[in-house]
Structures are given as structure tokens and as C-alpha cells.
């Protein structure tokens, strides 16, 4: 989604194939289970793709400190590895006057975070939440742990153009607001 926002028109990061690494599915012999990356890309294609990108600004996101080692440098035992602060909440949006899809992700793998989405819609006829089940470190390599899930939310939860919820740790979500 970052690439689309910067004008890239074609990006392919997964092979639509069977295999253990960088493939969309496990082999037929191992259950032909879809990878979480393939599942979220499918959700993106069904909800955000081929619509106008809208400006989405994240304000007040918590941060998490992560290791940021220099490429090619070997660190000795006890030597400090550089760190950096990373925003835990990211958002992208697309749509039009009667349909807005907002993709949000909580990159913090240990804490849930409240989010508030301000929309140019004052009310919605329907709100649909699309997400993945399973934990933030789960894969489908050995068994099905991650699956696409969608559910309808109460349209009254959009109040005066503001939708608030809590995003669980490590969760990607796409919220679709239909007027």
C-alpha cells in the first residue's frame, strides 16, 4: 500500500505458487494452505484496489523500539546494536464519496492499541471489518492457523464521522464504510 501511495502501479512480492518460502500456498502434499501474506493481499484486492487512494494520516501513534543493525556489520558479544523507533499504527485508505476502505495495522506484537478513524462520512449504511484470525506470529506452514475473516459491525458505531475501536496486537484490518 505504501508503494501504491507513491505511484507504483505494479508490485509483486509473492509467487503465486506452491512451496515453503515466498510462495502463496504450501504444496499440495502439505495441504495447499494459503500464506497470511496471500490472504491479506486478497483482502486488499477486494476492498482497496482499483479505487482512488485517499489521504490517510496517522497522529499520535505509539512507537516501539526495534534493533536496527547496520548491514554487513558483525556485532561482538555485548556490543550495542543500534535501535530505532517505529510507529506501531499505520493506515491507508481508498474509495470515493459512497465507499471508503481504511486499512490499518498494529505492528506492536505485544500490545493492543485504541484507534480512532475520522471519515468524511457522518454515517454509514454498512460497516464491514476484514481481518485475519490467529496470532501475529502464526503461519499456515504446518497447519491452518490463519484465515481470512469478515464481519458486519454496527453502523451506529460511526458517530459524527468518527469510528473508534481497539486494534489487537499484530493485527491487520480493513474497515469498509458504505454510505
Image (cartoon, rainbow, N blue to C red):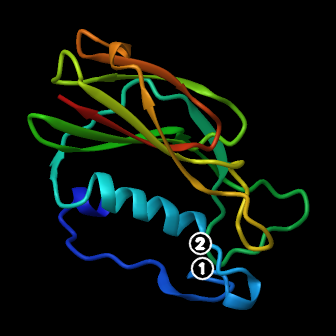
Tell me if mark 1 has few (under 14), some (14-19) or many (20+) residues whose alpha carbon lies within 10 angstroms of its own. many
Q: Mark 2 points at which residue?
A: 34
Residue sitting nearer the eye, 148 or 167: 148
Tell me if mark 2 has few (under 14), some (14-19) or many (20+) residues whose alpha carbon lies within 10 angstroms of its own. many
- The quadrant where residue 137 appears: bottom right
Check the image and name the residue furthest to the left: 97
Q: Is residue 143 visible?
A: yes
Where residue 123 appears, as percent x and y from the top left, is: 21, 17
- Which label number is shown at residue 46? none
Where residue 141 appears, as percent x and y from the top left, is: 74, 73
Quarter holding the N terminus?
bottom left
Q: Are marks 2 and 1 in contact (CB under 8 Å)?
A: yes
SS for dot 2: loop
Residue sitting nearer the eye, 161 or 98: 98
What residue lies at 41% left-to-right and 64% top-to-bottom?
Answer: 42
Q: In this view, does 86 lie to the left or right of 52?
A: right
Where residue 13 appears, as percent x and y from the top left, is: 44, 77
Q: Name the residue under label 1.
A: 25
- The quadrant where residue 155 appears: top left
Q: How many labels does the image show?
A: 2
Q: Mark 2 or 1 closer to N-term?
A: 1
Quarter holding the C terminus?
top left
Q: Is residue 139 above or below residue 115?
A: below
What residue lies at 25% left-to-right and 76% top-to-bottom?
Answer: 10
Q: Is residue 135 above or below residue 175?
A: below
Amino acid at each position: 500500500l505504501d508503494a501504491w501511495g507513491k505511484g507504483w502501479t505494479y508490485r509483486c512480492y509473492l509467487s503465486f505458487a506452491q512451496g515453503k518460502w515466498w510462495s502463496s500456498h504450501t504444496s499440495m502434499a502439505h495441504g495447499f494452505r494459503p500464506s497470511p501474506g496471500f490472504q491479506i493481499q486478497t483482502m486488499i484486492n477486494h476492498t482497496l484496489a482499483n479505487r482512488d487512494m485517499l489521504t490517510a494520516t496517522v497522529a499520535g501513534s505509539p512507537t516501539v523500539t526495534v534493533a536496527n543493525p547496520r548491514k554487513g556489520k558483525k556485532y561482538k558479544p555485548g556490543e550495542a546494536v543500534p535501535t530505532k523507533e517505529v510507529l506501531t499504527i499505520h493506515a491507508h485508505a481508498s474509495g470515493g464519496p459512497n465507499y471508503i476502505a481504511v486499512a490499518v495495522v498494529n505492528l506492536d506484537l505485544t500490545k493492543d492499541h485504541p484507534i480512532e478513524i475520522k471519515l468524511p462520512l457522518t454515517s454509514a449504511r454498512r460497516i464491514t471489518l476484514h481481518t485475519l484470525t490467529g496470532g501475529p506470529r502464526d503461519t499456515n506452514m504446518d497447519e491452518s492457523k490463519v484465515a481470512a475473516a469478515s464481519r458486519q459491525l454496527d453502523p451506529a458505531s460511526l458517530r459524527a464521522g468518527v469510528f473508534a475501536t481497539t486494534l489487537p496486537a499484530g493485527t491487520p484490518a480493513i474497515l469498509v464504510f458504505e454510505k
